[in-house]
Amino acid sequence: MGETRRRATVLLALLALYLLTFSGRFHSIDEVAALATVESLAREGTLRVPQLRWALGWTPTHVAEGVGGALYSKRGLGYSLAFAPLWLLGQRLPEVGAVQAATLTATFATLGTVWLLMGLLTSNGVPPARAAWVGLAYGLATPAWPYARYLFSEPLSALLGTAALSAATRLRGGHSRWAAPASGLACGLALLVHALNALMVLIFGGWWAWQAWRRRSGRPLLAFGLGVLPFLLVLGWLNWQRYGHPLNAGYVAPEERFVWAYSRSLPGMLVSPGKGLFWFAPLVLPALVAWPALWHARKELAVLVAAWAAGWTALVGGWFMWWGGWSWGTRYWVALLPVLLLPLGWSGRRAPRAERALVVGAALAGVGINALGALVDFNAPLVTLYQAGLPDTAVIWSWALWPPRLHLELLRQGALDVAWWDGAPDLPVVAGLVGALALGMWAGRRHRSGLALGAAALVAVALWGMAHHPWNAADLTAASVNAIIEEENREGDIVLLELVPYYDYFTTVQAWMNRYSAPPPYRTVVRGAPLPPDVQAMRDGHLWFVTERTPPGDQAAETERLLLARMALMDDRWVDEWRLVRFVPLPAGGWRESDFTFAGGITLRGAWARSGGLLIVRLTWQTARPLTEPLTTFVQLLDAQDRVIAQQNRVPGNGQWPATAWVPGRPVTEAYALPLHPEGVRLIVGLSTPTTGERLPLAGGQGDFATLASLP
């Protein structure tokens, strides 16, 4: 089998497996923060992410306030832009979904890393078959597999680091004028992906400085520097625009710093049960054993690998969150794993039997461990621990809480996190998998390309399984809400999406990101949190408030109560399990007021004003004694024949302030909006009993409603 065909077969096999374990949903706030920047750039032409203000409550937060109090994501711009092509494609293919499409970026980045890793090995004299084995091992027996389905930055860092290393080794056997600038380009892009990749610039800068000294020519170092310089300038400009200083990347929280606590971090990074490199990527052990073979074969490459690994260990080990936070296993090591596995290319048949057994055993253990990480959502056991009062760091040194062990238990319970599994297997997909495997085995016996044919069939089945993803059905409500807003919106509108505690924030945010395409910008708010600044500052347009599973009058609806206290209610409708409520800001002036007294000691100060083609009505009720029967507010616009043209009939405050809860002497204010109509001549207000429809009369027998305005 030719080298290119062998490498393509490896990629097809990995692609099939990655698609079969594809989840296509959010697992981390990192993913949401990165995609929010792409969304803001595409929709509003800005790097600001006001729609992510709800994430300020996370510790440490993934967004930061910058110049002028604007909110920005701390994720690298290169990290976000890498998702942009697939995100935009998903926007045009709603049956796929923007988030699902963007998630495939990590899949393709990992496949690209495998391709470069195999090419790097063969260009340094490793037999193609062994290089293919190392590439396959990296793709399956390390955390590269689980992270190929997440939108973390590490798969991109691994790709760019391998690209920089591949370019650097092009100098072997002669000078390549494109090697140094290509290496600089890869390092510069990596710097835009994640700030920790500044180490790559230092490591490869030192490498090219050494090459310049050896060749008595500064050209290699200059070419490398020219490759990096544009990205350094872009990064400095971005930091200055966002946070007011070229070196400020937004990491300003007190805990976000280097603490250099190596006595804890180094053992934890290498051998701890929950985060140790050797437990999640056991192939690193035989790679260390094979490092002398790499040294004897390619000393310069061995020096570069050793310097990079040592520098990365020192840098990450000094960071306050060296364990990678809320994630699967050795998250930060994923960026360096291709480099760490390079020595395996020189561990072959001539190695001692014990060394070969170590390689095989480590590979099998790695596949088993990381399969558990790829099949089960890493959030599931961590959430369980959190609910029991334990932090995510509890898994670091506890064998009882070893993540693969927790994942195995969840796997036994059927808690798979794959696209084609929704509580039960998709039987057509399972049948297709069996058929594809059988085809590959049958064709492989007859021709070398049969393996590739089988892998291609698996890819086709996996794509078919993705089409049955349960997220597609969950997104339908968001699509319906989007259609209403898109049809009825006007200039100056804002959409406010409420995230309800005890429900999955990521579920709501993902459905919205997948389906929302209407012109008004949207913002998010966690129930009970202060309203976003631009919502508080609204003076025109409509506010579309979207809440989930919250009926009118729900006393837990704190956000809706805040809106009712400062805006006028226009309409309220259900869209499946979501409710779409439209508000308009109260005008700053132009109010006309009148006072009325109803039977039973209820007084009303009514006010009305015109605003943007609407009649805004503000009602302030007050009772002299407790009320025992429920009442409904009615606001009606009548024509010359006293026919109702427009009206609002609601429990006061849309159910938030029922009359039976009014406190004597304490005013209750509510506001409503009615559309202006050319035939409307009279605006009336009153109270009625909801069970009988009987209206409460005015004091002194002056009728059963108050005439708030007579319109010309």
Image: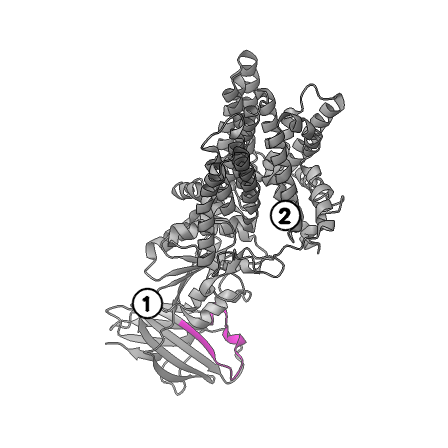
Is residue 106 at all visible to an observer of this figure? yes
Q: Is residue 564 magenta?
A: no
Q: Amino acid at mark 2?
A: Leu
Picture residue at 70% right of the left edge, 44% below the top: 274
Pointer 1: residues within 10 angstroms few (<14), some, or many (20+)?
some
Q: Which residue is mark 1?
A: 646
Horizontal side of residue 331 vs 48, given as left or right? right
| Residue bearing the label numbered 2 | 315
Q: Which residues are magenta?
A: 651-671
Q: Say which element carries label 1.
A: strand
Q: Left or right of 709: which side holds 523?
A: right
Q: Position of residue 601 (x, y in %)?
A: 47, 85
Please name the residue shown 74% across and 50% down the image: 263
Q: Nearer the viewer, residue 270 or 8?
A: 270
Q: Quadrant of residue 150?
A: top right
Q: Is residue 643 above or below residue 258?
A: below
The kind of residue on which mark 1 rests is: Ala
